[in-house]
Amino acid sequence: GAGVSQSPSNKVTEKGKDVELRCDPISGHTALYWYRQSLGQGLEFLIYFQGNSAPDKSGLPSDRFSAERTGGSVSTLTIQRTQQEDSAVYLCASSLGARQPQHFGDGTRLSIL
Amino acid sequence: AQKVTQAQTEISVVEKEDVTLDCVYETRDTTYYLFWYKQPPSGELVFLIRRNSFDEQNEISGRYSWNFQKSTSSFNFTITASQVVDSAVYFCALSEAWGVTGGGNKLTFGTGTQLKVEL
């Protein structure tokens, strides 16, 4: 499709397990962002990629969170040893360049039991 | 630090009424961008508009209009003749313009306003 694609749509896992969330940006978009949306915290920035580099990781809440991007395209957000407070919708956005409007995917709804 | 305040948590209107969603922001940047996004029940955030801080012209797009006032740090959004399909959560957001800290245009969001348009 033409939009940002995220998978899975929903993920339910047990506390302590590791999870991987995938984002496929719009073709040609060099900038990629991860955000988290939760009831308590609203929409929060997590990390920004320009190409394969992450100049800004300031929003990652702990060292259990990491992300990578390969080939200037697909990005994976990994959460290790999940905790219940990690339950949220994880949104990915991409833009043509760092200063262009961001277009969001449908998100991955993560539930930690 | 940047901050966006959307004081209206929820607004209910009857179809065809006009409605204004308020947004107040704080930033130390002299140049910045302001945005509005719509999040319908399906969950996807839909980009509506971006304004640059040095362009204070109001903008109209169909039934949507935006009033940017730098003097009051506000960027309000008006929907004229609202329709049921306008029901959604609307987010105002702010970013630095030049990404000088390396953060691209990471967005700082308000808490959103839930708009319900009823028949």
Image (spheres, coloured by chain):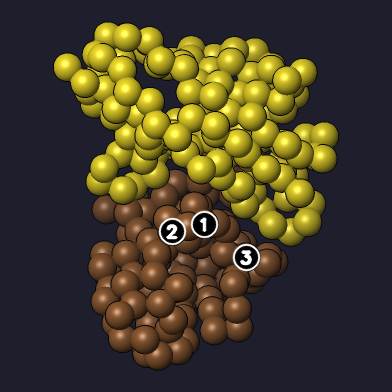
Chain colours: A brown, B yellow
Q: Is residue B96 above or below residue A58?
A: above
Q: Residues within 10 Å of mark 1 (few under 14, many from 20)?
A: few
Label placed on residue A59? 3
Circle 2/circle 1 CB separation < 8 Å = yes
Q: Are marks 3 and 1 on the same chain?
A: yes
Asked which secondary structure carries label 3, the reply is: loop
Q: CA distance from mark 2 to mark 3?
A: 14 Å
Point out residue B13 in the picture as x, y percentages from the top left corner. Answer: 31, 17
Q: Which residue: 58% across, 15% down?
A: B67
Point out residue B88 in the picture as x, y percentages from the top left corner. Answer: 32, 34
Which chain does the residue under circle 1 lie in? A
Foreground tag (3 vs 1): 1
Q: Amino acid at mark 1?
A: Gln
Asked which secondary structure carries label 2, the reply is: strand
Which sits in the foreground, B81 or A21? B81
Label placed on residue A109? none
